[in-house]
Image: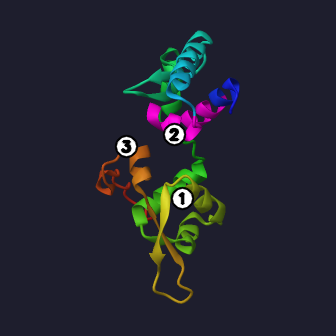
Amino acid sequence: MLMREEIKAAVEAILFVRAGRVGLDEIIEIMDVPLFDVIDIMREMVAEYQEANKGLLIKEVDEGYVMCTNPDYSDYLVKMTEPHKQKLTPAAMETLAIIAYSQPITRAEIEKVRGVKSERIIANLLEKNLIAEAGVKAVIGRPILYETTEEFLKVFGLTSLKDLPPLEEGLDV
């Protein structure tokens, strides 16, 4: 037979992993503990979490239990879920603009416009999901083609590529 603290620890782990409601009947089945013991332990755990003023709480929900965040800390969670502003270097912005206006485009074509190697910048833009591979160009060597992504549109507040500002006269990308 499991000791009371072991049961609490196991139930805590179950609630954490499930990240959703776990029914009282399921806890009884998993833990192989009598109903009245589980009810008593769960009441105790709910009170302990509440009294300890932790970032997590255990709540009773529809004849089951769920581990959730403490609403007292919601301001911090909101900050965490705010869109992350991506910092781009001027070189990355230049490369991204070339891709946006000329897509699909190969790395060699980008480098021809920029006049410098762009391999690292392209890798960084791929990692940030601002560009993606768009197949290969049907020429010798079959170089990879790049294009902007939905994430690019979101980050720059565009609904489509048609929303890109027109190029200044004399600029050729």
Q: Name the residue at the bottom extreme.
A: 140
Query: Which quadrant does the C terminus fall into?
Result: bottom left
N-terminal label among 2 and 3: 2
Crowd class of label 1 (few under 14; some 14 to 19; many from 20; radius 10 Å)? many
Query: Which quadrant does the N terminus fall into?
Result: top right
Q: Amino acid at mark 2?
A: Glu
Q: Position of residue 156 (x, y in %)?
A: 41, 45
Please report the residue visible at 55 percent of the width from the left and 13 percent of the height from the top.
47
Alpha carbons under labels 1 and 3: distance apart: 18 Å
Q: Secondary structure at mark 2?
A: helix
Alpha carbons under labels 1 and 2: distance apart: 58 Å
Alpha carbons under labels 2 and 3: distance apart: 51 Å
Residue under circle 1?
95
Q: Residue 21 versus residue 140: which sits nearer the camera?
A: 21
Depth check, mark 1 against mark 3: the one in front is 3
Please report the residue visible at 51 percent of the width from the left and 22 percent of the height from the top.
36
